Image (tube, grey):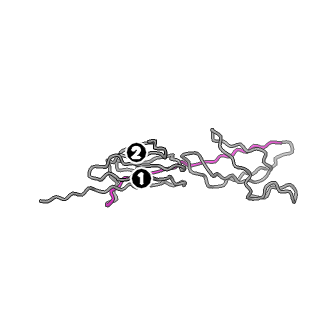
Amino acid sequence: EKDIRIGDYVYIYKAGDVVGIYNLSQDGKIEINNLPMGIYNLEETKTMDGLVINKEPIEITLTKQDNTTKVYTKNVTVENKTTLVEIYKIDKDSKEQITGAKFALYDDEGNELTSWVSDGTPYIIEGLSIYKEYKLKELEAPDGYYLLDNDFKFNVADNEGLQKIEVHNELVLKNIII
């Protein structure tokens, strides 16, 4: 946030310099050592699967507290929200939610993650990765509707809002001659 320097002319870091790139440990922690006193901004550029990147920089201030302490510790918590996807099965013309469609969701390696039958309410999936592509396949169409010809591919948005996916089905129309 501000230049970090010794005296008037020796710069350790200029404002905006990248001090380092750090990765989380298995337990979700980062340890950064040997930073001079100053004000830093911690910015998240990638996160764990199923979470949304926290786009707000976190200000960390390291200040001298006394003349005897040599090592200062600062604990900071970065909170991430999980991704959230709602899948709706709706009639192409009426836009009403319909029941009885059997779906399966696959990851980008072809692994089935979940399957369900539409019941007239949105199907909610939490924690999908923002780094993968997913494929939604209709396995069985509701009575009176055509089976979808193509699988529906999508990526999860990197935002904190609810991502809504509408899957449209077309009603089978028949002519009756009397």
Residue located 61% across and 55% down the image: 55
Q: Which residues are magenta?
A: 70-93
**How crowded is the residue under tag 1: few (<14 C-alpha within 10 Å), some, or many (20+)?**
some
Question: Residue 117, how many percent across, how many down?
Answer: 35, 45
Question: Residue 130, how many percent across, how many down?
Answer: 54, 50
- The residue pinned by badge 1 equals 152
Q: Name the residue type under label 2.
A: Ala
Q: Secondary structure at mark 2?
A: strand
Work out whether 159 lies above or below 48. below
Q: Are marks 2 and 1 in contact (CB under 8 Å)?
A: no
The residues bearing labels 2 and 1 have C-alpha atoms spaced at a distance of 11 Å
Q: Is residue 178 left or right of residue 135?
A: left
- The residue pinned by badge 2 equals 104
Q: Is residue 148 magenta?
A: no
Residue located 59% across and 48% down the image: 80
Q: Is residue 75 magenta?
A: yes
Nearer to the camera, 151 or 33: 151
Question: Residue 175, how many percent across, how many down?
Answer: 19, 59
Q: Is residue 39 left or right of residue 156?
A: right
Sequence-wise, the earlier of marks 2 and 1 is 2
Quarter of the C terminus within the rendering: bottom left
Q: Name the residue type under label 1.
A: Phe
